[in-house]
Image (cartoon, rainbow, N blue to C red):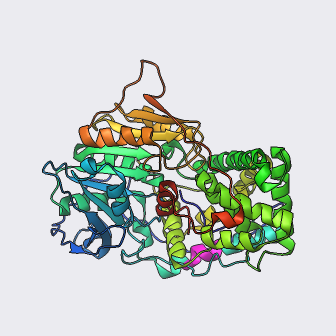
Amino acid sequence: MKPRAGMLIAAGALVAGTVTVLPAPAVAAADPEPATRPIAPLTWTDCPTKAYPRLQCGTLRVPLNHDDPAGRSISLALTRVAHTAKTFQGPLLVNPGGPGGSGRGMAGYVAASLPAKVAGQYDVIGFDPRGVGKSEPALNCRPGHFDPVRPDSVPQGAEGERAGVERAQAFAKACGDKYADVLPYIDTVSTARDMDAIRAAVGAPKVNYLGYSYGTYLGAVYARLHPERVRRMALDSVVNPHGVWYEDNLAQDYAFDTRQKDFAAWVARNDATYRLGTDPAAVEAAWYRMRDELRATPAGGKVGPGELEDTYLPGGYYNGYWPRLAAAFAAYVNDHDSAPLVEAYKAYAAADSAADNGYSVYTSVQCRDAAWPRDWSVWRKDNWETHAKAPFSTWNNAWYNAPCAFWPVDPLSPPDVRNDQVPPVLILQATDDAATPYEGGVALHRMVHGSSLVVEEGGGNHGVTLAGNDCMDEHLATYLSTGKVPRGADGAEADAVCDTLPEPEPAKAAETRGTAPSAGITLHGLLGHVH
């Protein structure tokens, strides 16, 4: 699950438009038998960057339909940082989540962020999943879908709701019109089978894996399909397999609202810098007043209520964004200066072609993976009930996922990811993570026999390793180096607990410009939490 390039129903009857449903493949995708196909060895070529001078690139052809290996093929774009140590522990595949996130940038970052003696024992491999980025075909269903200014995400009467539904229908129809032959194969199971093709292409009997966010679910599905091919698997910020995907998104709404309240409380504690008051509730109320004002007069002609939510949503993923977001908030309220707000929108939320591609794959995977309500009245009821308790991003998130109500491909049944056949899996989770709430980490821990749960107590960030927490990083490095996981006392929910990082220091608007990015900022950019 990935932050949005933005989104935007109420009482009043709506008639859903007609959408042609494309046929599903003849073979069900839950727990499929792997198809065999000769895989040519990968050829790597140097493609260095200033940050990662040893980076290499490659392309792998895989079947569009793994159950028809002689049929049409598609390409996956990969990157690698090759091992340097005499001890070689095989490939370490890395995935940043999404679905729809580009993974090519992850190889260099992970290789550079792990201790050199650990990274040097692996070929660290990143890849753009099918449909994403430099992989071909790359999906872009409806370019400009998130162009500002969108209607208010919170429906303003029946007409506002109807406009939102029609917009979601238009996106679903555009995907079906452009990619009718591809959409039945853009799903998590197919991507997991692509991972096995990568394993075969590099000549490894088993894979090591580090996945973040949605990448945790992808890893769990791979482990279910191929438990005998898993060597080590670390899963950071875990999707709850019980809620794929409609229920998980509703759970996110409550968690992001809580995280926005945490942001307001932090602003209140730093009133000396931001001058927005010392009462968190009053600060939060001021934010919603700003939102109301932007409905009438969008900042810079670009930032209306939906774009404002998109801009502040990354703060729910990572509190390293709070100083800049708070500075923009304060400048708007105290100084009637909307320029920092527009700058923050451009940095954190403005959609480009890469964001359009990511969203196209996001919807294609989530709408295909599992059934969503097809009756819009269910969405209306559930989202108004959730909005009443958690107004920050509920309707924004609803519109982001609304194409699934009208998706032109029949849904699959999610695989059961319970597993008692894999080696110890390391699960890493913050207790106050909004994007993948803590319950998901606990649920997967219980479903995967022999797994180990490492918890960042009091942490609210999404993505807790290689982001500055030395304690969490040490558990990851030890596991990748030795395969050992911590074991807690009998009956304990967590096997190990780390303290969370200190809160960010406040900064004024001018002080947030031009500073070198921290490890957390860099990681969260790769995870898709900034556009």
Name the residue located 58 percent from the left edge and 50 percent from the top edge: 435
Q: Nearer the viewer, residue 172 or 86?
A: 86
Q: What segment carries the magenta color? A: 168-174
The answer to whether residue 263 is above or below residue 77 is above
Name the residue located 30 percent from the left edge and 56 percent from the top edge: 93
- Occupied quadrant, residue 157: bottom right
Q: Nearer the viewer, residue 476 or 60?
A: 476
Confirm whether residue 236 shows in the render.
Answer: yes
Q: Nearer the viewer, residue 488 or 138?
A: 488
By secondary structure, the bulk of the magenta-drawn segment is best described as helix
The answer to whether residue 243 is above or below residue 190 is above
Q: Position of residue 45 (x, y in %)?
A: 22, 75
**Does 169 appear in magenta?**
yes
**Does 278 appear in magenta?**
no
Q: Nearer the viewer, residue 512 or 240?
A: 512
Name the residue located 29 percent from the left edge and 43 percent from the top edge: 480
Residue, far top: 490
Name the residue located 18 percent from the left edge and 65 percent from the top edge: 37
Task: Count up the numbered dots.
Answer: 0
Looking at the image, residue 441 sits to the left or right of residue 391; the answer is left
Q: Position of residue 261 (x, y in %)?
A: 74, 46
Q: Position of residue 228 (x, y in %)?
A: 22, 43
Confirm whether residue 27 shows in the render.
Answer: no
Query: What is the quadrant of the C terminus in the image?
Result: bottom right
Q: Position of residue 138 (x, y in %)?
A: 42, 77
Looking at the image, residue 26 sits to the left or right of residue 378; the answer is left
